Image: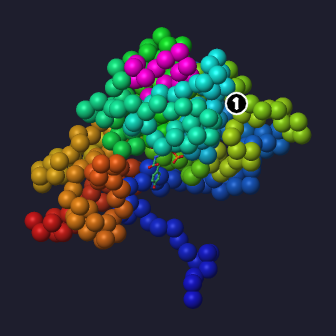
């Protein structure tokens, strides 16, 4: 007989190398449980969770270099990216607005463009998987409402040249959105120029439910000015608050409370320690893989892409290792908080055994 739902356990993170989710921080887990039935979508009724949301947005703003942030805790990176495109479309003067993004941008921009009826122009990346500024410039025109830069790409962990993209966007009269959904909790410590204090960024995605160690669902949308959220707001006649800017109505109080708790607990020292741990481990892994003759895409953030023979990729997956591929077939190993040296040593042992070396 099938075990009841109450008897089941979600899978362990032991062999998960493919995910951008991770074990939540214990404080986040506890906060989530305490706010399970709160709805941040109705802040006048659920004022305690509304306060936590304001605290989370303030701390996310600090992390992304913005002293007075506007924004909210979304359901994830997809909602934050959709809303960035939504705001840009609503603020655009053109009747036929377009969005220009590198081909490395997450597929949530495809969803956004389709939902919002804007044209998405994807442009090739350079030889090292970053946005090619000249190619972006060539695609931008007077109808461009938004230029997208990725700070920590899903496939290769690459950081686009955000200041150059920002200059280009402002010259064209367009907004600039930075997608730091995954990279955002590493970038304050990595020395990159990526945030609001490094360039003229209008909006930014940074997800507590990825490297931030909140529970799922907790994404983050930040904006430099109030105009962005105003452009998203609809009137809410029968709520105590007059307008709502989020895409969803009822939202997860657990996600919001967990985001606030994780940020309170870990920003900045805990996240710095995690960045340093993860990047050292990533560099070590890249050397180990390269030393075995597998071509490695040199890591920039804690993510390694490596070209494994197809049969080996399949064989290691067959042993329960959760490994995902890039569009061109490299294996991606995301060095998340649950991935430690022991995990990677057993992964390498499995590769060696299966490759017969
Ligand atoms: N922007 C970037 C740069 C991302 O990497 C992702 C997700 C998103 C936006 C969208 O975020 P949400 O999934 O929160 O809406 N990147 C991973 C992906 O789509 C997410 C992921 C998470 C994948 C857990 C696997 C997994 O187990 O591949």
For residue 239, what is the image quadrant? top right
Res 114 → quadrant: top right
Which segment is the magenta one? Answer: 136-152
| Left or right placement of residue 353 versus residue 91 in this view | left
Q: Is residue 249 left or right of residue 100?
A: right
In this rendering, is residue 80 above or below 202?
Answer: below
Is residue 228 at all visible to an observer of this figure? no
Please give the name of the residue rendered at 31% of the width and 66% of the height, measured from the top-left corner. Answer: 317
The structure residue drawn at horizontal position 48% and vertical position 10%, both measured from the top left corner, is 171
Residue 198 place in picture, x, y as percent: 44, 18
Q: Quadrant of the C terminus?
A: bottom left
Q: Any atom of ligand 1 within 8 Å of the CB at mark 1?
A: no
Residue 126 seen from this side: yes
Residue 6: where, in percent of width, then height? 62, 75
Name, please, the residue furthest toward the bottom. Answer: 1
Where disc 1 sits, the SS reads helix
Magenta stretch contains residue 169: no
* Residue marked by disc 1: 232
Query: Which of 279/290 is in front?
Result: 290
x 49%, y 25%: residue = 147
Up-down relation of residue 316 to residue 129 (above or below)? below
Assign the N terminus to one quadrant of the image: bottom right
On screen, residue 333 above or below 231: below
Q: Is residue 143 magenta?
A: yes
Which quadrant of the figure has residue 104?
top left
Q: Is residue 254 left or right of residue 345?
A: right
What sort of colour scheme is used for the picture? rainbow
Identified at 12% across, 69% down, the residue is 356
Residue 336 higher or lower than 188, as above or below? below
């Amino acid at each position: 007989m099938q075990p009841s739902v109450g008897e089941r356990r979600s899978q362990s993170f032991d062999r998960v190398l493919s995910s951008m989710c991770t074990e939540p921080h214990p404080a986040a887990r506890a906060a989530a449980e305490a706010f399970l039935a709160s709805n941040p979508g109705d802040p006048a009724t659920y004022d305690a969770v509304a306060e936590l949301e304001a605290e989370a947005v303030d701390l996310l703003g600090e992390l992304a270099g913005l002293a007075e942030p506007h924004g909210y805790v979304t359901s994830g990176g997809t909602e934050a990216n959709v809303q960035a495109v939504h705001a840009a479309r609503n603020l655009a003067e053109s009747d036929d607005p377009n969005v220009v993004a590198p081909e490395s941008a997450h597929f949530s921009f495809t969803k956004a463009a389709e939902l919002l009826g804007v044209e998405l122009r994807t442009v090739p990346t350079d030889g090292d998987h970053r946005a090619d500024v000249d190619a972006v410039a060539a695609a931008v025109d007077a109808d461009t409402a938004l230029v997208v830069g990725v700070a920590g790409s899903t496939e290769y962990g690459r950081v686009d040249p955000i200041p150059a993209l920002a200059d280009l966007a402002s010259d064209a009269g367009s907004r600039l959105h930075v997608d730091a959904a995954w990279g955002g909790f590493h970038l304050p410590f990595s020395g990159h120029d990526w945030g609001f204090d490094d360039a003229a960024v209008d909006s930014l995605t940074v997800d507590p439910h990825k490297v931030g160690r909140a529970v799922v669902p907790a994404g983050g949308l930040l904006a430099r000015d109030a105009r962005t959220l105003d452009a998203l707001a609809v009137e809410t006649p029968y709520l105590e608050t007059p307008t709502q800017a989020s895409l969803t109505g009822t939202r997860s109080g657990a996600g919001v409370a967990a985001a606030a708790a994780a940020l309170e607990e870990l920003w900045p020292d805990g996240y710095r320690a995690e960045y340093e741990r993860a990047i050292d481990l990533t560099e070590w892994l890249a050397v180990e893989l390269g030393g075995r003759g597998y071509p490695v895409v040199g890591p920039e953030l804690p993510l390694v892409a490596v070209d494994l023979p197809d049969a080996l990729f399949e064989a290691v997956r067959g042993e329960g290792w959760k490994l995902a591929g890039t569009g061109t077939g490299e294996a991606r190993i995301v060095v998340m908080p649950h991935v430690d040296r022991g995990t990677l040593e057993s992964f390498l042992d499995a590769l060696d055994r299966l490759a017969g070396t």
